[in-house]
Image (cartoon, rainbow, N blue to C red):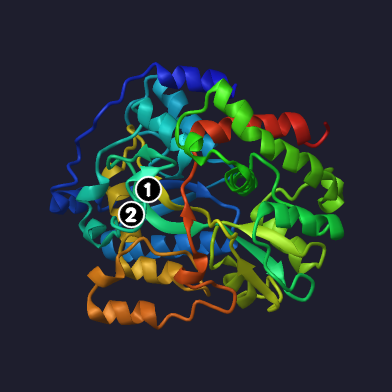
Amino acid sequence: MKRMLSLVLAVWPVVGWADPDPADWDAVLAEAAGQTVHWHAWGGSTATNDFITWVGSRLTQEHDIVLTHVKLENTSDAVTRVLTEKTAGQDEQGAVDLIWINGANFAAMKSAGLLFGPFAEALPNWHYADTATKSLRHDFTVPTEGYESPWAMAQVVFMHDTDDLPDRLGSMEALLDWARSNPGRFTYPQPPDFLGTTFLKQALIDLTTDGAALAAPVTEESYVEVSAPLWAFLDELTPLLWRTGRAYPQSGPRQLQLMSDDEIDLAISFSPGEASTAIANYQLPDSVRTFVLDKGTIGNASFVAIPYNSGAKAAAMVVADFLLSPEAQLRAQDPAVLGYGTVLDLGALPSQVQRAFQALDLGPATLSPEELGTVQPEPHPSWMTRIAEEWVARYGVGN
């Protein structure tokens, strides 16, 4: 089914849509008033859901926009919905107005002309975006070209309970060595959950000797050679996992629950502030801390995109712009709320706002920018599609 979807997507050319015009922001605001935006976004985190509810309340107050959070388990569900409407000729008033999207899903929608835009760099708050030091114009190596707008920074960290695992682990080989001495004390969410596939990507990057190949589309020749160390690593690691690799947590929050229940000592996160947020919310013990690998870890931006047939394009752009605002970015970075990294250039902000960011207590388990070290780029999305498929064939529950 996934391959059929990819083939169908590939036959449509890229289409540019210019109405409403993001360069005429007064007209955008006038059109947005009274519109309802159906934001299709991952719904597996209470903290994230609460943040989206707050965004909706602010948009109602400021712009008379109603924001409805359509909670997803998989972003591909929203992509499929837009594709189904395209196939049926429903080119207006689609069910999806905004998507929290990344990677392969963005690449597929962009290449198939299923996105409205370009709009992102015309948003009023774009001038605060840190395009110099953060990768905000590429998504998993694919140029965004204004078809999606960033709203949060993410980087892989490993959460460890220092009562049981006092010291950081510097590599995937070190993780495997530790697992040999501590069987059953590590797991990761079951792919295709995004956090589970993130662990696979991180292992692939850390273990490969040909990182340059990962930036290009996968080929049969490159795949076999580059992925071989990953499968050797997983073959040995899998029986050492929680429940001997015969079961996996279904999501990141379930992984946190296992750590809270002292069933595991080590877990992966794509948010450097997640552990501090979980400690503040009493979801994790205050003995939990985070680390990154010696070579660095994967980092990227989270984006939102607007489908080509949204009936609320103006209001969707206002949502995207608000997510870029210093107010929303400051709240999202607060570990008591989300603990997400900001996409803004703090030096470009008014001095009072800079001081507010500097005054944030990022929490006991949040690494400083210096401690986060090198940010590794995402592989081309074709790598993850291929790796995830083979993981299911090799290790999927029931195999």
Q: Quadrant of the C terminus?
A: top right
- Front residue of 43/248: it is 248
Mark 2: secondary structure:
helix
Q: Pointer 2 and pointer 1: residues touching (CB < 8 Å)?
A: yes
Query: Is disc 1 placed on a helix, strand or loop?
Result: strand
The amino acid marked with disc number 2 is Val
Classify 291 as above or below 398: below
Mark 1 crowd level (few <14, some 14–19, many ≥20, 10 Å Cα): many
102 horizontally vs 230: left or right: left
| Residue 46, x across and y down, in percent | 59, 62
Kind of residue at badge 1: Val
At x 77%, y 61%, the residue is: 258
Number of marks drawn? 2
Does residue 297 appear to the left or right of 241 in the view shown?
left
Q: Is residue 207 left or right of residue 97?
A: right
Q: Residue at x 76, y 70 (%)?
A: 165
Q: Is residue 79 above or below residue 55?
A: above
Measured from the top left, where is residue 180 in percent x and y?
84, 55
* Tag shown at residue 37: 1
**Residue underneath mark 2:** 319
The disc at residue 220 is none
Ranked by sequence position, the earlier of labels 2 and 1 is 1
- Of 318 and 375, nearer the camera is 375
Residue at the (80%, 56%) spot, across then down = 179
Choose between 284 and 65: the one closer to the eye.
Answer: 284
**Residue 45 image point, x, y percent:** 59, 58
Q: Classify residue 389 as left or right of residue 320.
A: right
Which corner quadrant holds the N terminus? top right
